[in-house]
Amino acid sequence: MSLPRSSSRAARWARFQPPQRPDGHVDRPRVQGLIDSTVTRERVTVVTAPSGYGKTSAVSAWAAVHRDQVAWLTLSAFDADPHRLDTGIVQALQSLARSGNTDFAEILAVDAVSDDPGDTLETLSDALDGAQRPVYLVIDDAHRAREALAEGLLGALIDTGPDPLRIVVVGTSYVELALARWALTHRRSSIHADELAFDMNEIVGMLAGVQTDLTPERIFEETRGWPIAIQVVQLTGVSPLSRDGHDDELMRDYIREHVLGGLPPELARFVLHTCICRDLTVEIAAALSDADDVERLLHECVAMGLFLDRFDTDEGAVYRWHAKFARHCNEILELSQPEKREQLHRAAARFFEPTDPLTAVYHWIDAADFDAALSTIHKHWVGIVVGTESAMLERVCLSLPEPYAQDPTVLLVRACAQDIAGAQDVARLLLASAQSRAAEGDEDPSFELSLPRAQLFLLDDRAEAARACAVVQAQLQSADKGSIQDHAALLYLLGWTEMRHRNNPERTAQLLSAAAQEADAVGDDVLQRRALSHLAFVLAWTGDLKQAEDVLADLGERVDDDGPWHSYAGGGASTAAGLIAYFSDDLPRASQALSQVLKGGSGKRTFAGVARMILAWTAAASKDPQLRRRAGIELHALPTQEAQGVSWNAFRHASLAALAESAGQRDRALSIAARYAETDDLPLLSVVLAGIVRRSGDPLTALQMLRRLVRYQTISYIQVATLITGAMVQRRRDNLELTHSLCEQALEIAERQNVRRPLCDGDLEMRQLLTEHLAWGTRYEDFVAVCLRPHESNSPLEMLSEREKAVFDQLRTTRTMAEIAQALAVSINTVKTHQRAIYRKLGVASRREALRLLS
């Protein structure tokens, strides 16, 4: 039975919701008042106690009073990854902001996947500066974060977070150890087990309506107010048989005999069987139970207060067993029905495998079925590694017993996970070990299937990677599609590899587009966003700037990645935006978008490296000394050798050439450009370097460089650069008819895709060519007029208002005053008023003088 898309999403988003208060919930004003006073007094409140003390129940009851101010995050074992924890914190705060509370709307502007906790802390502080009321961030099950608890963003928020943000950290005693520095210096900020325990008055209230011969005094004496013991007394009316209530074996027996034993057999069996999954949906419960109406049984468990919390999400209800109760039920099942327990874990594994294979692997291991666990890894590892859980998959692989841990495909999986984590040397060692073990053993079809897929991650040589791509594509097209479980992930992996190696731009865009569509169809939001992000970059790189902007518009404010892939290959959308802005000659917007990539912590071997190169070109074009210095410093972070098919040294050289030319060091720039005069596979670099050569007064050599890009002649900015450079060559030959024909062809493409940079790069000869073409006659007068607008910050044009600049752009054309008024949708008198203001500010007396001044 496959997990419906809504169930998968519901389980994921339940972590941002506090549990519902069950029917019959007994308010504890003393505990709620204690939490309230502590949170009011302290920026950080630490609620710690062993399992069974009702920490989550107490805090969620308090949170219900402040519902429109509470951001809730329940951690899982995956949150031991600091970056995932940081992302979860921001997403929890943004979930509160999206709930309709306009007080916190500015939180939505915070980058959820930034790798810089300091930057996120700063932007969060700015967003909360104007908050009229406190924002409460609850981190539940915080002990699951382990060492990550005191690191990253949470550590920064605890140390120096904004005052309107109050943090409540809930977990076992490990939490207090992890946050020892805070706890020791803020002793009144901690709430412990003895304060969460029931007092005599609360026990009396809890037992109201319960049929029992036990007195409150006896219950208090035997349980010492331990909440889980009080709750089972409330359920059963029977003494817990332990003087302090903390004996695990006695509590397990008590649950078996008095809690489960007091339930109707159908309900008791349902509880025992479904407790092997702590998180449940109706579909999961149905896969584990032979009951006819699982939805009714789940409702009964919640209504009875039977240690089951309900979370309502937009995608449906999610249920969660209390950890201690679930553990005891699992122990009871293992002791009484070990074969049934293994059978249930197998059922859970089969249920989760289509949509959550990593969880399926955990269940196979719990069932001691390591062959099935290995089979699931073999089938689904690409989807897991391409997703957000590569680090967890490697931990699972390491936990496998021998000989499974040394299986060649398992070693390949670990190599890819290490590569994503940034440990490239370890990844290569694991790859070599995998190949060696495979060579020593018998023929292994799984290894043969997985090796080319792993090579897409691990190979740097473009030719070898191209061969691996061809093999994987053949696998996708084979008649036996049963072995390919994660089709969207494989499509994405192929597209990502093709993008890096620049083999076939059109095919790359097709692969990424198909991956995004398939990821959307199966509800994989993360992969869909990442595929769209990379698609936007590929479209921008291939010169389809308009379509790239459409893809970015579809992405909207959604981050393009999270998890380990953000530092590995995140930032594609912002890099695309920067490249689009650069070629559109919107240099401030380019600088802003590219800076966002670097600030967000994208891996330097992927988009951050590309962003540094384009930032250098942007800085050179802007002639801003401060931006040029910064861009020069950023180049030190570029990789020093080719990696994953990317020629990083060439990227560095092209960046240095642009900066050198901008600084007046033309000879140095030309010497760098000469190294790449024969290059035919670096289209972006060749356009920039050919521009340097053209501006040095050698358009013929520049044209020869551009014509070598045979494979990329359909790319818009290459077409524009080639045609306009050809026009310049013909102009020098006095072939005016061909000159203006080439100009018009270049402008047609440039206007369609808004490619302005090759036409307005500050070259005097280019400005003369475009000015002459305006006089000759063109369909693109407005476009040319904007291209002729100077960039320099000290240009006289900067004295004009935006409306006056628009009028001045029109004055560059051959239009009459009436035609200008019509083009701007204003009256002739308005145009004349602006014209007089322009002449006055520029100190000229005529249209000709104004144009000569800014020619």
Image: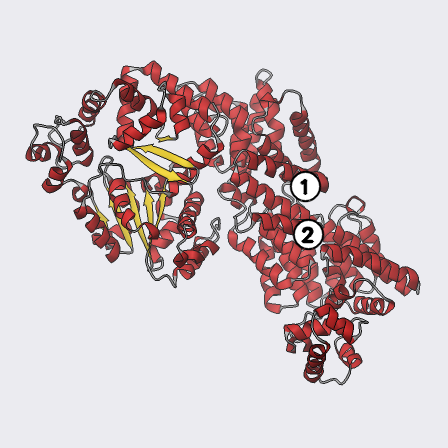
Q: Say left or right for 613 vs 336.
A: right
Residue under numbered circle 1: 509
State the quadrant of the C terminus. Answer: bottom right
Q: Identify the image quadrant of residue 516.
A: top right
User: Badge 2: few (under 14), some or many (20 or more) residues near its Cα, within 10 Å?
Assistant: some
Mark 2 or mark 1, earlier in chain: 1
Residue 525 drawn at (x, y percent) = 52, 40
User: Badge 1: few (under 14), some or many (20 or more) residues near its Cα, within 10 Å?
Assistant: many
Q: Are marks 2 and 1 in contact (CB under 8 Å)?
A: no
Residue 757 drawn at (x, y percent) = 72, 60
Residue at the image position 68 percent from the left and 62 percent from the top = 585
Question: Would residue 366 be seen by someone viewing this image from the given angle?
Answer: no
Q: Say left or right for 45 vs 352.
A: left
Mark whose residue sits in front, 2 or 1: 2
Q: Identify the image quadrant of residue 521.
A: top right
Q: Identify the image quadrant of residue 642.
A: top right
Residue 273 drawn at (x, y percent) = 33, 21
Q: How many marks?
A: 2
Q: Eyeballing the image, is 156 above or below 835?
A: above
Residue under numbered circle 2: 546
| Amino acid on which disc 2 is placed | Lys
Given residues 712 and 41, the one toward you in this image is 41
Question: Would residue 171 be seen by someone viewing this image from the given angle?
Answer: yes
How far separated are the C-alphas under marks 2 and 1?
14 Å
| Amino acid on which disc 1 is placed | Ala
Q: Say left or right for 518 vs 760.
A: left
Q: Say left or right for 828 vs 187.
A: right
Residue 612 drawn at (x, y percent) = 61, 55
